[in-house]
Amino acid sequence: MACRDDLLPAGSMREKSILARQLGFKAIELHGNNVWHREKEILTAYKEGFVFSDIAAGYRGSLFGSHPSEHLKAYKTACSLLRFAAEIGADGLVIVPFLGLPFSSLNSLVNLSFHQDKLVENLQGLAELAEELKVNIFIEAVNRYESPCYNRLEEIARLISRIGRSNSKILADLFHMNIEERSIQEALCRYGDRVGLVHLADSNRLPPGEGHIDFRKVMKSLMRTGFTGYLSFECRGKIDAPMLKKAVEHIKKIYEDL
C-alpha cells in the first residue's frame, strides 16, 4: 500500500517517508504539484531507500480541449514528471484527461471529436516516452461533479485502446467509482486486466473503513483479476495518523481473511 504525501502529518519528505513506514505503508504517492519545489528532498529520500509509488498529475496546462500553447505546456511538463518518476523508481504518472480546464468549457468546444483525437495524440506521445523510460501512465476516471467527461472505467478503457500501448493503464479510484459505476465489483472484474493503480478512499472520501464501501468485495474482485499494482490512499477531510493506521490495519485484515 501507498499513501499520498499530503495526507502524512510530517514536515520533510524524509519525515513523511519514516511516518509512512511506521503506519504500515510500503510507499508514498507524490502529488505532482509538490514535486516541483521538493525535488531535492525527494531525491534524497529515494537515495536513502524510501519508496515512491507514482506521481499524481501536477503537470501544467491541459492535455484536452484547450489552446495549443496549453497542450504544449501540459505535454512538456508531463514529460518532465515522467522522467522524474523514472529517476526515483516510481511506477509512473497519473493523468486526468480533463485536468486544467474549467468545468463548463466542454460545452464551448465546437468540434469535440477533434479535441478527443488531440488528447489521444498527446497520450500516445507520453506513453511512448514512458515506455522508453520503463514507466507507465495511469489514466484516471473522475466523477461527473469534477469532470464532465471520462467518468467511468469503460470510458478510460476505450481511451486506452486508442492509445495502443500496454503501459497505458487505468487508475481506478474507489471514491469516484462509488459515484459513477453501477457496481464497483463488476467494473473491476470487467476492466481489471487494464487497471494498474487503485486509489483507496471510502464513500465519504475518508480512509477505508470510515464510510460504506464494502472493501472485502473490492479486494476480492482485485484478487480475481490478478492485480499487482499499488493500493494508494488518496483521501480528503480531517485525517490524522491514527486514522491512517486504523485504515491500513483494516485493509490488511481483509486480505488476510480472503
Image (cartoon, rainbow, N blue to C red):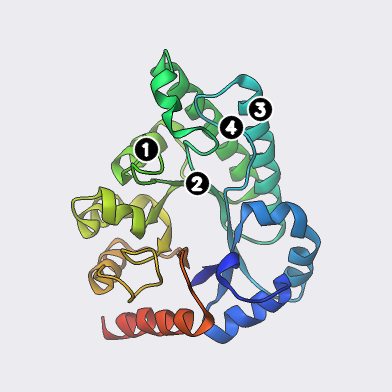
Q: At which x and y percent is residue 54?
A: 58, 58
Say which label, 3 or 2, has the lower sequence index.
Answer: 3
Q: At which x and y percent is residue 215?
A: 28, 71
Say which label, 3 or 1, has the lower sequence index.
Answer: 3
Instruction: Let me know if residue 198 appears in the view.
Output: yes
Instruction: Let me know if residue 86 appears in the view.
Output: no
Say which label, 4 or 2, has the lower sequence index.
Answer: 4
- The reply, left or right, for residue 73 in relation to residue 207 is right
* Residue 167, numbered circle: 2
Residue picked out by circle 1: 150
Residue picked out by circle 4: 125
Dot 4: element: helix
Distance, label 3 to label 2, CA atoms, is 22 Å
Say which label, 3 or 4, has the lower sequence index.
Answer: 3
Furthest-top residue in view? 110
Residue picked out by circle 3: 72
Taking depth in this image into account, of 130 and 123 the one nearest to the observer is: 123
Q: At which x and y percent is residue 196?
A: 44, 55
